[in-house]
């Protein structure tokens, strides 16, 4: 009898080793990515549902890896979280974003806001307050021009400390958006307890909005609830004119997605708020 099961196992082990070796290599590359200037930012416009012009932008980080090419944040942000490198990366992103937003303000886009993603690990560290304060001070950006996007799941892991952190951020004057809203298991009643400003409807509800009545009902419920709590709403992942229209009609305040623009390099970002 020919036995090849062993080979299968050995092959499996070898691929596992190759995968973890690759991971280790990537991790050590990431350690140097900031100082080598390999990280860069793209900006996705946030569109007013009222006049369909861009009133802000979300900053999304990318990594131009010397061998692997352009990597999306899903490939390295979780790794940055696990290794603690997210602290340096997050500080760099915040510094760049606030400096950039300050420039927009200087050329007359006074109401434009910049949105920056904050990972669960960043949000759990008291140090975040210092990082945000430093970025605001160094850039001289008015705090109200900065929106921090924090996922629903990071807010829900420890609601008590989340409330404390959110209060501290609020005292600094920055805006807070709950990202990926609707994907967690949070009871809607938590929304009332959290000092937040914006609810960002997850793109999984927007995708089939026009075909799936369940998704449409959820989206309408989120918008209505947010309205009652005096929170603004952003829908993400808007890919068609039809979705945009349904969202606008339902009372959603802001829209974001490929239908309006993919994330673009800074040079291609255009705001419609009139410079005054
Ligand atoms: P997110 O914050 O939920 O960002 C939205 C993601 O959806 C982005 O992917 C964006 O490019 C993509 N997207 C935008 N419009 C559409 C659309 O119409 N359809 C579809 N299918 N997708 C759309 P991206 O840039 O790959 O970012 C993935 C995630 O990485 C982000 O999810 C965010 O959680 C994280 N991330 C990105 N930049 C940063 C950062 O600077 N810091 C931290 N901590 N996390 C970041
Ligand atoms: Ca986001
Ligand atoms: Ca999101
Ligand atoms: Ca997400």
Image (tube, rainbow, N blue to C red):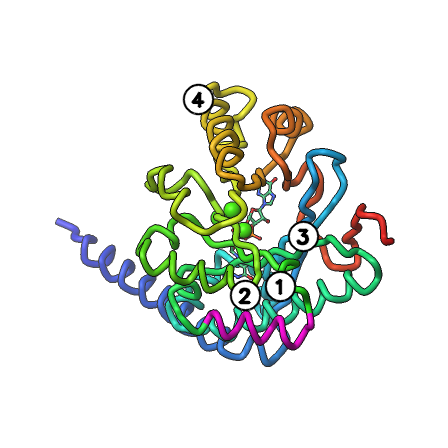
Q: Is residue 4 above or below residue 232?
A: below
Pointer 3 residue Cβ closer than 8 Å to ligand 2? no
Indicate which disc, 4 or 2, sits on the residue closer to the N terminus.
2
Q: Estimate how packed mark 2 is, as few (under 14), some (14 to 19) or many (20 or more) residues with alpha carbons within 10 Å.
A: some
Judge from the rendering whether residue 148 lies leftward or rightward of residue 137; answer left or right: left
Select label 4 or label 1 by which is in front: 1
Q: Secondary structure at mark 2?
A: helix
Where is residue 83? Give x, y as percent: 39, 72
Q: CA distance from mark 1 to mark 3?
A: 15 Å
Q: Which mark is residue 214?
A: 4
Task: Mark yes or no: residue 236 visible.
Answer: no
> Magenta residues: mostly which secondary structure?
helix
Q: Are marks 2 and 1 in contact (CB under 8 Å)?
A: yes
The residue to which callout 1 is attached is 143
Q: CA distance from mark 4 to mark 1?
A: 38 Å
Residue 130 forms part of the magenta stretch = yes
Q: CA distance from mark 4 to mark 2?
A: 39 Å
Where is residue 259? Give x, y as percent: 68, 36
Residue at image point 56% right, 39% down: 233
Select label 2 or label 3 by which is in front: 2
The residue to which callout 2 is attached is 172
Q: CA distance from mark 2 to mark 1?
A: 7 Å
Indicate which disc, 1 or 3, sits on the residue closer to the N terminus.
3
Indicate which disc, 2 or 1, sits on the residue closer to the N terminus.
1
The magenta-colored residue range is: 128-140
- Quarter occupied by residue 119: bottom left
Q: Nearer the viewer, residue 166 or 154?
A: 166
Residue at image point 77% right, 66% down: 103
Where is residue 159? Give x, y as percent: 33, 53
Q: Which mark is residue 57?
A: 3
Q: CA distance from mark 2 to mark 3?
A: 21 Å
Q: Secondary structure at mark 4?
A: helix
């Amino acid at each position: 009898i020919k036995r090849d099961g062993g080979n299968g196992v050995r092959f499996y082990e070898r691929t596992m080793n190759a995968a973890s070796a690759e991971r280790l290599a990537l991790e050590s590359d990431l350690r140097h990515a900031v100082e080598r200037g390999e990280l860069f930012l793209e900006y996705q416009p946030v569109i007013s549902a009222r006049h369909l012009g861009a009133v802000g932008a979300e900053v999304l980080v990318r990594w131009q890896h010397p061998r692997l090419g352009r990597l999306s944040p899903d490939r390295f942000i979780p790794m940055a979280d696990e290794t603690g490198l997210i602290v340096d990366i997050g500080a760099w992103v915040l510094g760049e974003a606030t400096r950039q937003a300050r420039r927009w303000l200087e050329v007359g886009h006074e109401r434009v806001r910049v949105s920056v993603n904050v990972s669960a690990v960043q949000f759990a560290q008291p140090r975040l307050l210092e990082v945000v304060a430093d970025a605001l001070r160094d850039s001289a950006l008015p705090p109200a021009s900065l929106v921090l996007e924090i996922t629903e799941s990071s807010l829900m892991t420890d609601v008590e400390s989340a409330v404390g952190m959110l209060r501290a951020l609020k005292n600094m004057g920055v805006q807070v958006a709950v990202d990926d809203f609707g994907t967690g298991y949070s009871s809607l009643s938590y929304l009332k307890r959290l000092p937040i400003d914006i609810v960002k409807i997850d793109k999984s509800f927007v995708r089939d909005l026009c075909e799936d009545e369940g998704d449409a009902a959820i989206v309408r419920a989120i918008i209505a609830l947010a309205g009652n709590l005096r929170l603004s709403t952003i829908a993400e992942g808007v890919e068609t004119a039809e979705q945009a229209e349904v969202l606008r009609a339902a009372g959603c305040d802001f829209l974001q997605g490929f239908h309006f623009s993919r994330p673009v390099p800074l040079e291609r970002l255009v705001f419609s708020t009139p410079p005054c």
